[in-house]
Image: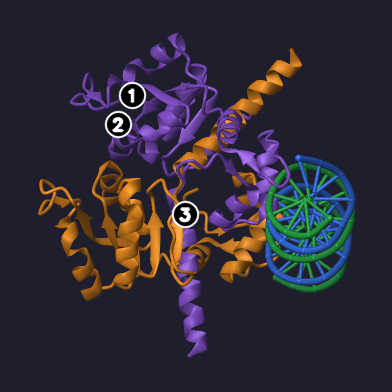
Chain colours: A orange, B purple, C green, D blue
Amino acid sequence: MAGVEIISASRISQDLGVQHTQVRKDLAMTGAQGTPKVGHKIDELIHLIEEFLSWNQTNNAFLVGVGNLGMALLGYEGLMQSGLRIVAAFDHDPSKIGTRIGGIKVVGLDRLSDIVTAFPPHLAIITTPADVAQGIADRLIESGVKAIWNFAPIRLHVPSDVVIENVDMRSSLAVLSYKLKQKTKSCVDID
Amino acid sequence: MAGVEIISASRISQDLGVQHTQVRKDLAMTGAQGTPKVGHKIDELIHLIEEFLSWNQTNNAFLVGVGNLGMALLGYEGLMQSGLRIVAAFDHDPSKIGTRIGGIKVVGLDRLSDIVTAFPPHLAIITTPADVAQGIADRLIESGVKAIWNFAPIRLHVPSDVVIENVDMRSSLAVLSYKLKQKTKSCVDID
DNA sequence: TAGATTGTTAATCGATTAACAATC
DNA sequence: TAGATTGTTAATCGATTAACAATC
């Protein structure tokens, strides 16, 4: 693909296995305008998509719960590329407090409310066990957090003005299991 | 809730903030039959849901990539409760090979094809970095794996008879960012 | 019985897909 | 020009929601 400066929606739809109309609508959302018979300028398109997804402007975030999942997120550079910068991590465990993971300092959970109030981030990430997640969410919201990215396997209750997005591995697994079950069933039908 | 043996779809829909018709349709999918004016027997309902989601029958799975994310999954009991048992983990790193994480042995990646061929699991979990994920998927499928749960941040190409389910944190983040952006925008509009 | 609940059938809504005019 | 591509407008499809008869 080196040297290619133009891409057509048709080509994108082929590569992605998506309807070309869908691709066109998505591109239109970003404000992209292509030229008929030619296509879209790649660099222009990338810029517009980044702008649409707010990847060009960084959101600061706090992370609560430095377990394996929390550490995985702290070490994932993809977040920074998507405009998300984790600026502090909180945990209960004394052996973790004061250490640095991926350059980010781990702070005691008891200082959560103070620090959130002092430096209110747009966003907080919850990677705690399920049983403490709601309590953490309450404290975060009380201190001014307006959006929560929840990885704890539990349905959180938040006020309607707080944005919440769940990463629910179990429902993803349920979908996978169901597909697998259906496939197995149809095989049996054929026999 | 102790002692409650009956639950109504109306009650579930209230608690979950979902349309009651939706709950009824979902329950009907599992084959549940309630009695008018009364509701559904809770234990019966739980059993039917577990059966529908195949939580009562265990799927064996291999996990490839024992990084932070892989370790998080190895240590997550919720998977076992959802009918997924990880029976072996694979990694490239010599310092990890031979160790046990959550009771599951870490095996060298070079033995992947052999072991998968010998004990073909229904399912494989990919928690490797993006750049090696496709290669791993190819080897797994070649050795007989029929379903892949992919956590690597990349779109995998698989034959149409292989079930694939992606856990895409970045698109989840994109949704969250978009919601946050919209909310901020509407605030400005009000001013 | 009256009221609450079930479960189905119809109506609405939105998203996806198809068709087509515009254009370089 | 002819053909490829864009982008919009119409049609289809599916899912969600509303309405209602059945029932204990």
Residue furthest toward the bottom?
B191
User: What is the x, y in percent for residue B184?
Assistant: 45, 77
Q: Identify the amino acid type marked 3.
A: Ser
Nearer the observer, A175 or B21:
B21
Label 3 CA crowd tier, 10 Å (few <14, some 14–19, many 20+): some
The kind of secondary structure element at disc 1 is strand
**Could you tell me if residue A72 is visible in this image?**
yes
Q: Identify the amino acid type marked 1.
A: Ala
**Residue at which label 2 appears:** B66
Query: The numbered mark 2 sits on a residue in which chain?
Result: B
Q: Identify the amino acid type marked 2.
A: Val
Nearer the observer, B188 or B29:
B29
**Residue at which label 1 appears:** B89
Q: CA distance from mark 3 to mark 1?
A: 27 Å
**Residue at which label 3 appears:** B172
Task: Tell me which residue sits at (55%, 31%) in the image.
Answer: B50
Query: Tag on residue A167?
Result: none
User: What is the x, y in percent for residue A51?
Assistant: 47, 69
Residue B70 is left or right of residue D22, and the answer is left
Q: CA distance from mark 2 to mark 1?
A: 7 Å
Query: The numbered mark 3 sits on a residue in which chain?
Result: B
